[in-house]
Image (spheres, helix red, strand yellow):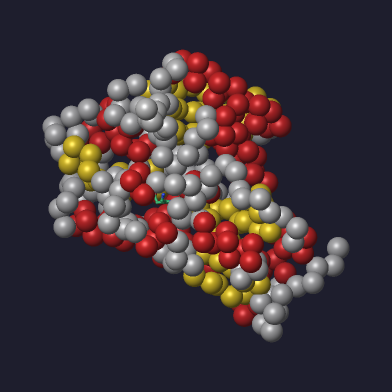
């Protein structure tokens, strides 16, 4: 196989959002590609793209709504040829991509766990009655309220740095962040305690970086194959099949995590009501190659237990 490789004169254009985490992920992608093909960094250009979700930062995400809030502009630039690939946090990605685009390359996954962030307390159980905690994640809000219905959960939007600033300013006494983001930014100084997945099951695909490309771009497909992580792909196949069968979007409190042991895949999943008044969780174990079917089966099972009105908040009836 001989690939027409990029060069400083004809660089590969890598599209990304502009947050420090997004940039770290784009840099990691560039480094892995440069290493795999023994290319200088100048053979790649990182192109920062501002998305609707980045522009509107003063309103809760669920009010702005709409699919692809953080991806629409990036995907349009890929289809037009302004960029060649786009680097994403997989947990923010819908299960289906726009016509003409493919998202099937994953870098090795980071720690998928959430972290409890507070300079005063080291665990959820230590928070005093009625304490204020900040999160903009519907999943974390619901999971917190299942365990601690007394908590006052306030909206905490913005990138990692913004959220930590809010904590410093006393807007809340604790918040929750993905370990992956903290690790990728080298932020070990932030007061944090990992939460075991049995206590707070992470979002589907949490900690995984995905690389999207034009479907017909075989040159780029060949390049990306060199940096794809098979195990992450197997885990995400099961998790995203689970998510797809639930018809979930980033506005739905859904959690799911697959782990591998030898040739065996274990998939845990959970669906919740946003107010924490109801939650259903279960798991499946089987051969890796059955991961997609296990994801669908687990979703069907949880849906049947959740009852017909469980997902009504996703699409409020317009009467
Ligand atoms: N929705 C925001 C988002 N998307 C990906 C990450 C962290 C990195 C990851 O999970 O891969 C975060 C921030 C967070 O949840 O703390």
Q: Could you say which quadrant of the image residue 182 lies in? A: bottom left
Residue 117 visible in rendering: no
Q: Nearer the viewer, residue 101 or 156?
A: 101
Q: Nearer the viewer, residue 57 or 164?
A: 57
Task: Give above or below for 59 relative to 300.
Answer: below
Task: Give above or below for 96 relative to 36.
Answer: above
Give the quarter of the figure containing the N terminus.
Answer: bottom right
State the residue at coordinates (45%, 23%). 281
State the residue at coordinates (71%, 32%). 289
Q: Position of residue 151 (x, y in %)?
A: 19, 34
Q: Nearer the viewer, residue 119 or 46?
A: 46
Would residue 169 appear left or right of 232 to someone viewing this image? left
Q: Position of residue 252 (x, y in %)?
A: 42, 35
Task: Give above or below for 165 relative to 142.
Answer: below
State the residue at coordinates (18%, 37%). 152
State the residue at coordinates (65%, 68%). 81
Q: Residue furthest front?
A: 319
Would residue 120 appear left or right of 28 to someone viewing this image? left
Would residue 249 appear left or right of 210 to someone viewing this image? left
Q: Position of residue 74 (x, y in %)?
A: 54, 62
Q: Could you say which quadrant of the image residue 258 lies in? A: top right
Instruction: Please count the marks in the image.
Output: 0
Residue 38 visible in rendering: yes
Q: Position of residue 118 (x, y in %)?
A: 23, 48
Give the quarter of the figure containing the C terminus.
Answer: top left
Q: Residue furthest bottom?
A: 9
Q: Nearer the viewer, residue 122 or 230?
A: 230
Task: Give above or below for 289 relative to 82.
Answer: above
């Amino acid at each position: 196989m001989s690939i027409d490789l990029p060069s400083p004169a004809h660089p590969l254009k890598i599209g990304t959002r502009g947050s420090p985490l997004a940039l770290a992920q784009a840099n990691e992608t560039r480094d892995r590609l440069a290493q795999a093909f023994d290319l200088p960094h100048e053979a790649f250009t990182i192109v920062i793209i501002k998305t609707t979700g980045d522009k509107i930062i003063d309103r809760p995400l669920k009010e702005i709504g709409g699919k692809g809030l953080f991806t629409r502009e990036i995907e349009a630039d890929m289809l037009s040829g302004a960029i060649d690939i786009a680097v994403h946090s997989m947990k923010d990605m819908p299960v289906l991509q726009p016509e003409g685009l493919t998202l099937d390359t994953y870098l090795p996954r980071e720690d998928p766990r959430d972290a409890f962030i507070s300079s005063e307390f080291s665990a959820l159980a230590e928070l005093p009655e009625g304490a204020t905690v900040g999160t903009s994640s519907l999943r974390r809000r619901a999971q917190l309220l299942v365990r601690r219905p007394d908590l006052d959960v306030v909206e905490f939007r913005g990138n990692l740095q913004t959220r930590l600033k809010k904590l410093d300013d006393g807007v809340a006494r604790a918040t929750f962040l993905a370990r992956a983001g903290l690790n990728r930014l080298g932020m070990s100084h932030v007061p944090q305690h990992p939460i075991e997945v049995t206590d707070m099951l992470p979002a589907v695909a949490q900690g995984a970086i995905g690389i999207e490309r034009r479907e017909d771009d075989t040159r780029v497909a060949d390049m990306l194959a060199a940096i794809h992580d098979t195990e992450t792909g197997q885990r995400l196949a099961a998790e995203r099949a689970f998510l797809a069968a639930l018809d979930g979007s980033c506005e739905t409190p859904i959690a799911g995590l697959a782990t591998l042991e030898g040739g065996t895949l274990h998939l845990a999943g959970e669906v919740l009501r946003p107010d924490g008044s109801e939650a259903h969780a279960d798991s499946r174990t089987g051969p890796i190659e059955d991961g997609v079917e296990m994801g669908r089966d687990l979703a069907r099972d949880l849906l049947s237990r959740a009852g017909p009105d469980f997902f009504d908040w996703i699409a409020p009836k317009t009467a």
